[in-house]
Amino acid sequence: MIGWFKIVISTLSLFCLMVFSMPSAIARDAAILDVRLWTAPDHTRVVFDLNKSVQYRVFPLSNPDRIVVDLFKSDLKVDRLKLPLPDPAITKVRYGKHEPSTSRFVFVTKEALTSESFLLNPSKDKPYRLVVDFKRKLKQQPKEKDVTVTKDVRGKKTIIIAIDAGHGGEDPGAIGRNGLKEKTVTLAVAKALENAVNGRAGMRAVLTRKGDYYVSLKGRVKRARDAHADMMISIHADAVKQRYVEGASVYTLSDRGATPDKVAAALAAKENAADEVGGAGPFAMDDPLLNMILGDMAKKDSLISAEILAKQVLKDLATVGPIKYEHPKKARFVVLGALEVPSVLVEVDFISNPNREKVLNNKRHQEKLAAALLSASENYLRRQGLLDSENRRADVEVDLGHETVKMEFPCANDCQRVSLLGKPVSLLP
């Protein structure tokens, strides 16, 4: 009897051991689901998608220069990596099993580089991620703030307009029904606006990002400040569940406290969460030192100026497409946190509307949006006394008798009445 009891106990013990050890064995290794690479002006970012958090290490090697990434207790589930190499930092990558349960990635670099790495928890539709930034050594270049002391041919200070293309890189922003990504639209409009601004005498544009990579919200604010921008426009495209919703809207920073407008508050929460998707640390909007230096009156003046700019942007955008909200809304947008720079966030339309998605993907419409934003900027700057009427331009047709010439022509306060060498000209539509 005792013998049978011992057999039963032994069997049960073995069974329990198997049951409780199976989950740990099955869940032992993390799955590496994908590996992506993004190239920015000052660094290259490599992102590992994971099904769970992992232990890892990153270290450099020399002769030749390499950076090694080891992911412990992991298994690569991708047959072949498709990375856009070579890039300015990395020439090639080798990968495989370094030890039975360790996945090793060896990135061959063009020179000795430093690196930063961090893990991200799941966010929205993103899984666990390991982010490794390869920091490049950039050649010494003039700082953006040096631009602010440049002058045009008349000795006037150059007007700096900071242009922020929302999202980028790991963060696609909203995605339309036909696959158009918000980050693609915002960059296209931003570049069109940059070209338009740089084509104006006495004005210069500074982009917060120039390609498909992510810049933290804190980084965008810093770039506007470093450039000593006179104003800032952050470009976005909205999205909602209702496919029929359309139209542009403009937002300014809510000075303090909760945002009473639920729509604006929800949008701010969505845009402020971009760092979680794009891969950046938390950022406190208010800089205590800056607040002390600026003072309440200076901040109030900047916020009032932003409201004036926002109203002008809405007025000019109405000439190229539908408007969702006739008046600017306020919310606590982190990207508008440069309190000394009058700033607005512009949702150019709803990418979630298939018809508007198609329009937003049209280069000609993107240029029209940029032209409207430029017009609003110039009108605002003139109203603030920062831009002379001499900077105004009109697209005209000049009848020279034997031929008609199309050209851009400077005009005074009334651009509807211009002449060239005493000859009347016709404004182009």
Image: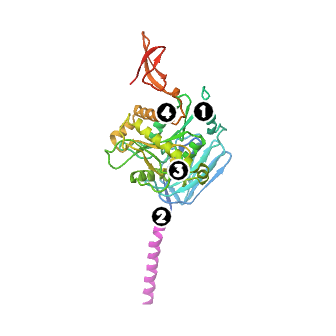
Q: Give the overall secondary structure of the magenta segment.
A: helix
Residue identifier under label 3:
47
Query: Which circle's residue, 4 or 2, is located before the other in the chain?
Result: 2
Query: What numbered label is drawn on residue 371?
Result: none
Residue identifier under label 1:
157
Is residue 286 shown left or right of residue 237? right
- Give the x, y percent position of residue 69: 59, 53
- Give the x, y percent position of residue 183: 46, 43
Label 2, secondary structure: give it: loop
- Please report the bounds of the magenta region as a residue range: 1-25
Residue 146 shown in magenta: no
The span from disc 4 to disc 2 (Cα, nearest Å) is 60 Å
- Give the x, y percent position of residue 81: 50, 46
The answer to which of 130 and 310 lies nearer the viewer is: 310
Q: Quadrant of the N terminus?
A: bottom left
User: Disc 3 marks which amino acid?
Assistant: Val
Q: Residue furthest top?
A: 402
The answer to which of 298 and 1 lies nearer the viewer is: 298
